[in-house]
Amino acid sequence: MAGSIDALLRQNAHSPSYFALARAEGGHQADLIDFCIPCNPYFPTPEMFGRLRDTLETILKYYPSGADTITAELCSTLGLNPQTVAMGNGSTELITWIDHLLVRESLATPIPTFGRWTDQPLETGKRVDMFPLPESRDFAFDPEAFINFIRERRSRVAVICNPNNPDGGYVPRQDVLRMMDRLIDLDLVVVDESFIDFVDAEAVTSVADEASIRPNVIVLKSLGKNFGLHGIRFGYLVANPALAGTIRKALPKWNLNSFAEIVVFLLKEHRAEYQASLARLALDRRSMAQQLSSLPGLKVFASQGNFILVKLPNDRDGVQLRDYLLSEHGVFVRECGNKLGSTSRFLRLVVRPPQDVHRLLTGLGAFLYGRDKSHLITSVPEPRAGQFEQVSPRLQVTPIETIYQTRAS
């Protein structure tokens, strides 16, 4: 088992599919708790899944509508102009087309980060300028240092993930806008906001509204990550009409499937539930970070994503821990040894409900200290002010349309 799981988890910079993990486990996934794939555990609602089950035969038998129809409905829900949007079969399809159509010679991106932003351009012969995020500063992104790095390397495309994967670091909106202003001369600036709906550090977070009117900016979104529906494979980008149109023209006619269409048309009815899921997950993230920080020797990094990066003590290895948690506790975790700029001492742990975190902490305690540490779950001290939040969190979740319609003064 350990060998096959290790091959799956270390073969590239992306997490394997849940199906592959389950098969490697012999199909025994009923009691498996997945801290590896970053899903939203509270959305879709049981009612939405019921609607999908009721329409399963129709979904599977018939072609979906064209992408224009599905895109128009999504834009109506989010308050976007369809001319500034292109929808893809997952954000990876859009990354592929961005690379093929808009990246000519070189791309700069921080590391560690989402693996497709380094792997995709390398696969097509581009130069990738990798800007290391210093562990000594908890992988904090310094926009000014990144701009200087781009100038020194003469990179033509810049990419940042905000929040970043795997550390969950968030760059405030105004800092991103200033960076975009400074890089107006580049061929392209991409801000991958796949996890930005999970941010509660400030009221308005996305720069998608600015992307629609700037000459060289694309903002990427992943609906699968936000909605907890990775299997449907749907994402979108926002850019000025010319850039968005360039991508749209390259996409296949039926690149979006019928599951994606049904979910997009359900969103208007369930926006309140979606916002509630984000608020609930933010509370879980704070609680989970507190509990992880109570384990001696385990370093916990501040996160605004739906995952938390931790670093193991010097004498502990993430591969061994990953295999132990799987075999002894039925818990999958993401060991980050195959991510550029990381090592196997780092784990990315998806935020999950408290009862699941209890099992994770029990396994972590047993592995790290040789005895059960589950009692720590009920004796977590109150965190110090600002210990896990990079900026004071907002009290209410901003309505989804406001994220796109509000412009900074």
Image (cartoon, rainbow, N blue to C red):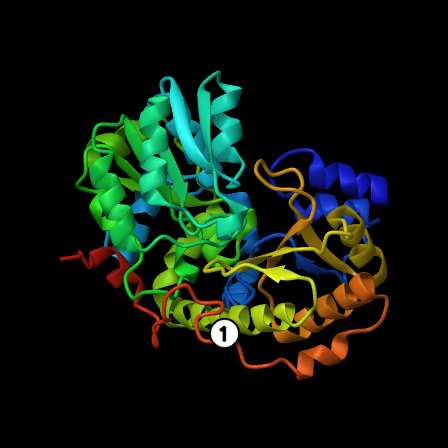
Where residue 292 appears, as percent x and y from the top left, is 64, 68
The residue lying toward the viewer, choosing from 76 and 333, is 333
Q: Which residue is found at the position 19% from the left and 59% from the top? A: 406
Q: Is residue 242 visible?
A: yes
Pointer 1: residues within 10 angstroms few (<14), some, or many (20+)? few
Q: Quadrant of residue 127?
A: top left
Q: In the depicted view, which residue is nearer to us: 68 or 196?
A: 196
Residue sitting at x 30%, y 38% = 218
**82 up-or-down from 97: above or below:** below
Q: Pick the residue in front: 370 or 250.
A: 370
Residue at the extreme bottom of the image, as rendered:
379
Q: Residue furthest left?
A: 409
Instruction: Say if 356 sits above or below 56 in the image.
Output: below
Q: Residue at x 37, y 45 (%)?
A: 142
- Using the image, determine if residue 198 lies above or below residue 126: below
Quarter of image, res 274: bottom left
Q: What residue is disc 1 on?
A: 283
Residue at position x 49%, y 69% in the image: 387
Q: Is residue 86 visible?
A: no
The total number of labels drawn is 1
Horizontal side of residue 213 vs 255, given as left or right: left
> Residue 314, percent across and down?
73, 52
Name the spot of residue 366 as percent of width and height, x first.
82, 66
Q: Amino acid at mark 1?
A: Leu
Quadrant of the snapshot with the N terminus: top right
Of residues 317 and 243, the one nearer the viewer is 317
